[in-house]
Image (cartoon, grey):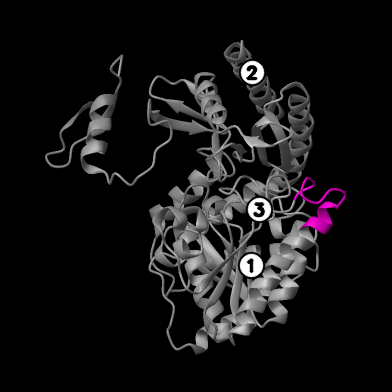
Amino acid sequence: MGVVHSIMAGFIGGGEQRELTKEEIIRIRETHLSSANEMFFKEDPLMIMRGEGAFLYDEKDNGYLDCINNVCHVGHSNPHVVAAISQQAAQLNTNNRYLHPNLARLLRRLVPTFAPSDLTRVTLVNSGSEANDLALRMARAHTGNEDIITLNHAYHGHVSSTIDVSPYKSKGLGVNSPVVYEAPCPDIYRGKYTDQTHPGLSPEALGELYAQEVGEIIATLAEQGRRPAAFIAESLQSCGGQIIPPPGYLRRVYQLVHAAGGITVADEVQVGFGRVGTHWWAYQTQGADVKPDIVTMGKPMGNGHPVAAVICTEAVDKSFARSGVAYFNTYGGNPVSCAAALAVLDEIQTHNLKEHCVKIGHLLISKLEDLKNRHRLIGDVRVLGMFAGIELVTDREQRTPATAEAKLLLQKMLKERVLLSADGPDRNVIKFKPPIVFSEENVEELVTKLDRVLAQLEGDQNNDRE
């Protein structure tokens, strides 16, 4: 492992304190931590000791520009959020079966972010997986139906019910639920319907073709005397490759699902809370008349503190209540979690971070399109606020995924002390979804280093051809 690094850590029992080396920590993880746990940069893992704003710092206090952390939404170690959590933890933390003003304050501030809509009933939980699991239960209780329509490459969580509707994970596990139907992801660059497969069609027309795929699933169900319980989709698909659905897609899908007696679930766990800039929630970018019946949220809600929520219409809520199984979540809606979520809302509103996302998004589009013009490895750039994807290809005409090059780019950017990740079906899409305090200076650093690394990769390709 090279030079031995160490940190202070305590041993359980006796209060003994001594230094644990980086090598010891790795060995303990390998021995005792489940081997199913994933870690960034396995070949040379980072030891991250602190964070501030858009940066993470290792045990030597080297700073890394964090371009992928969509959990610490308003910045690592945000002072206001830290203070809110600390102060409330020092006073009280208990379940929400007692009255507490923090829960009421959070509900009063959260619900208006969904207006205009009928989304008024909130359930507080701990994670996005819990939120999506509850959303599926609500949908089935409300409709009396079992079948769920999801998108390929979707990811909705790690519990059994959400794995079933997450082809991103279930395909690798061999899971094939008989009540889950998979529609094509509306990827108009390398999906089923693109400007290459259907020359001359507008993005809206391509979106209609993708929506009709959902209609065909509904028709197949009807032939069997069945109707969908719900259509669930991430408003912007992240793990599937930073996919921004074409205009009108969600509107048309929601119409089809509602007409068939189903309801719609917008998964905002990764992309909500103002990341798109123009709106609080990504589904709202598809039009004011696009109104899901349930919205789930999580990750950024507590800036790293485990808090999530489900918001639904009054009709869905009443149906779920009539199911006869009372819902209780020990930690959902506890005073500390509510304090964290309130502090996140404070930061977004006080510092105009939604507007900031718009500004940074415009800068990103300009800078990344310029990189695309100068680097043949970049096949597509897609940006919405502070959510962006750079699709790498080895051939722009064939749009051949540059999977190996994407992996190498991440390694080279790590040496430049910039943290990025790759995803999508072919792991060739560079993901960008940082804390939304990411600044113009941060963008300049990212783009300058990307430019340098892309030039190196393309130089290596040229040498390989000679």
Judge by depth and name the residue closer to the eye, 453 or 387.
453
Q: Position of residue 21 (x, y in %)?
A: 25, 24
Which residue is drawn at the image coordinates 63% and 20% (left, top)? 449
Residue at image mark 1: 108
Mark in front: 3 vs 2:
2
Task: Say which label, 3 or 1, has the lower sequence index.
Answer: 1
Quarter of the figure with the N terminus: top left
Asked if 51 appears above or below 448 in the picture, the reply is below
Residue lying furthest left: 14
Q: Is residue 391 visible?
A: yes
Mark in front: 3 vs 1:
3
Q: Position of residue 26 (x, y in %)?
A: 28, 31
Residue at image mark 3: 236
Which residue is drawn at the image coordinates 79% and 62% (left, top)? 208
Tell me which amino acid carries mark 3. Leu
Is residue 201 rendered magenta in the image? yes
> Quadrant location of residue 289?
bottom right
Is residue 460 rendered magenta in the image? no
Residue at image mark 2: 458
The magenta span reads 194-206
Mark 3 lies on a secondary structure that is: loop
Tell me the crowding category of disc 3: few under 14, some 14 to 19, or many 20 or more residues within 10 angstroms, Cα based.
many
- Give the CA distance from mark 1 to mark 2: 53 Å
Tell me which amino acid carries mark 2. Glu
> Quadrant location of residue 183?
bottom right
Q: Is residue 333 visible?
A: no
Mark 1 lies on a secondary structure that is: helix
Tell me which amino acid carries mark 1. Arg
